[in-house]
């Protein structure tokens, strides 16, 4: 029985890893202040969703959907909601999950008294990232249109959800030229 406990303890010790940073999981979308989501983003309310596609695919989607010809694609893209012009800006950001792995640390610590150099040093931590698209919307007066209490906020969020669904369902962005 005692050997079984030692075996379970050693197995747990060698398979243990502790997360130090965890990337959030956003099921569909979320409206929150961008700066609270990721440092370096503006202090504006934003529409955030996970991006399972490759880098710059959202850029290509917006470029083709709004026929921008690679000019001012990420900033102040004009969109219409209830015949009112708003301006859409977006950011593609990565959030990482970082973990500390105990097994390599313990192995290198055990080898250190025998004058061995650390051989598993690059395995001490591991990182895994998720990409997100962060959308902000402003009006002609540069007001935050996704902020609680803005008169057209709900209609704008509905449009952004439609954009997200269309983006995730589209694989060939050139086909967007033929859609209205």
Image (cartoon, rainbow, N blue to C red):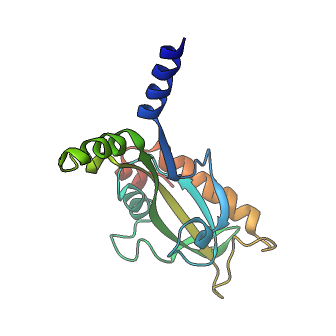
Q: Residue at x 40, y 77 (%)?
A: 72
Residue shown at 78%/70% (left/top)? Answer: 148
Q: Nearer the viewer, residue 41 or 166?
A: 41
Depicted 52 relative to depicted 39: above or below: above
The front one of 114 and 47 is 114
Q: For this view, does 123 lie left or right of residue 179?
A: left
Counting labels gives 0
On screen, residue 70 versus residue 139, left or right, reads: left
**Image quarter in which the N terminus is found:** top right
The one of 93 and 128 positioned closer to us in this rendering? 128
Residue 96, quarter of the rendered image: bottom left
Q: Position of residue 139 (x, y in %)?
A: 64, 80
Residue 158: image location, x then y, percent: 69, 56
Q: Residue at x 44, y 45 (%)?
A: 170
Work out whether 111 lies above or below 39: above
| Percent coordinates x, y for residue 11 in the rendering | 44, 26
Is residue 37 shown above or below 24? below
């Amino acid at each position: 029985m005692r050997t079984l406990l030692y075996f379970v303890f050693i197995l747990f010790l060698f398979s243990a890893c502790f997360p130090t940073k965890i990337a959030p999981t956003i099921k569909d979308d979320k409206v929150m202040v961008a700066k609270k989501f990721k440092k370096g983003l503006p202090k504006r309310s934003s529409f955030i969703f996970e991006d399972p596609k490759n880098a710059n695919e959202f850029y290509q989607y917006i470029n083709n959907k709004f026929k921008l010809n690679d000019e001012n694609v990420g900033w102040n893209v004009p969109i219409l909601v209830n015949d009112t012009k708003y301006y859409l800006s977006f950011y593609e950001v990565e959030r990482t999950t970082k973990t500390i792995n105990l097994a390599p640390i313990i192995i290198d610590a055990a080898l250190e008294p025998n004058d061995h150099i650390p051989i598993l040093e690059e395995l001490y931590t591991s990182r895994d990232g998720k990409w997100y698209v962060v959308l902000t919307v402003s009006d002609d007066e540069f007001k935050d249109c996704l902020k609680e209490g803005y008169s057209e906020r709900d209609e704008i969020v509905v449009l952004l959800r439609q954009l997200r669904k269309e983006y995730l369902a589209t694989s060939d962005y050139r086909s967007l030229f033929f859609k209205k």
